[in-house]
Amino acid sequence: MSKVLVIGAGGVSSVAVHKMAANASIFSHISLASRTLSKCDAIAASVKDRHGVDIDTFEIDAEEIPAMVRLIKQIEPALVVNLALPYQDLPIMDACLETGVDYLDTANYEPKDEAKFEYHWQWAYQDQFKDAGIMALLGSGFDPGVTSVFTSYLKKHHFERIDTLDIMDCNGGDHGQAFATNFNPEINIREITAPARRWENGDWVETPALTIKQEFDFAEVGKRNMYLMYHEEIESLKTHLPEIRRIRFWMTFGDEYIKHLDVLQAVGMTRIDPVMYEGKEIVPLQFLKAVLPEPASLGETTKGKTNIGCIATGVGKDGKEKTLYINNICDHEAAYAETGNQAVSYTTGVPAMIGSALMLTGKWKGDGVFNMEQFDPDPFMKMLSEHGLPWQIKELEGPLEF
């Protein structure tokens, strides 16, 4: 049994904290902190109502390292779970280093002034964390996170060598809004509008954002257009499984979403550089975030399912070429009934809880900075099925035709 400090109070945090409270044999005490105390208190009230577990709440600016250090020393957690914004990864890691406490997050660092998210900033902490005798687990969400573990599981149990990997993220949910994002709008739009990159034959291949599209028939969702994007697990997977010749990431978007996004880009509302407005500097994308629906508010109205997984082609354990598809399907309404949050938050919050549990129980341990695929996938995969994200594997007739 261990104390844990969770930073952030969005939908993902809400799911993770509800799931932690439901596993009191592992998480003996949960503290929740964010910039907005009222959001923490609302999550705590829901957890108390659903699970009868008391959660301490705190107000904190996670970018203020001295304040973070004081809070960590006050609580004395065994693990800090960072479910805040990616901008705050490095300050929280610094606070963990100063206090000697393990660290976990779901998304890699990106600077505020550039839409560029890569692992090298956090990988640079390897020696410091190793020398301090503490562990950092990066990307314990779904993608990255579960998709990384899916890949290592396929490699361990089904493939001698993986040659190509396609990660496919489909959200078939309908929330009834003209335009809304499924998680933090600022982060979501920065990712989507960044140039697409894939890993191919030992090098990066870059194309303009949202210019490569394919149709795919997703089980229990139907045919959807999916677009080639860059995502951080490509960087870690190509590093830790260098045998893979090609890695691509795809995400589905509806025509209405793309139309609205095109207009917002055309009029400058997705810019991340400051502009002057009535004598004050504002960042257009941050203003847009303020007027868009809060993702955590979409749970009650969202219907449909998500379908996220990996298609891998390579040489099987029998020496023959094969293509396997491993995926999870999650229902928005079921996720909301259990935690009060829609499936996009659920599919990230559950893996955050699982990664935390594996660290706290010592099933995943080490000194330094690690990505998900570096550990034994089996205990993680077992907990996925036990805690609301069952998965399945099927063999396809051949590789993807595109």
Image (tube, grey):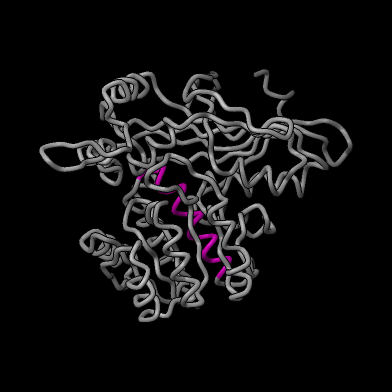
Residue at 55 percent of width and 41 percent of height: 328
Where's residue 54, x and y in %?
A: 31, 73
Left or right: where does residue 167 sit relative to residue 324?
A: left
Residue 161 falls within the magenta-colored stretch = no
Left or right: where does residue 75 sit relative to residue 117?
A: left
Residue at far right of view: 319
Residue at 42 percent of width and 63 percent of height: 91
Left or right: where does residue 123 sit relative to residue 73?
A: right
User: Magenta segment range?
Assistant: 342-359
Dominant SS in magenta? helix
Q: Is residue 231 visible?
A: yes
Q: Is residue 298 positioned above or below 12 on the image? A: above
User: Number of callouts in the render?
Assistant: 0
Q: Is residue 165 positioned above or below 401 on the image? A: below
Residue 353 falls within the magenta-colored stretch = yes
Q: Which quarter shows the C terminus?
A: top right
Of 381 and 187, the residue lying toward us: 187
Q: Is residue 304 positioned above or below 361 on the image? A: above
Residue at 35 percent of width and 77 percent of height: 70
Where's residue 211, x and y in %?
A: 49, 19
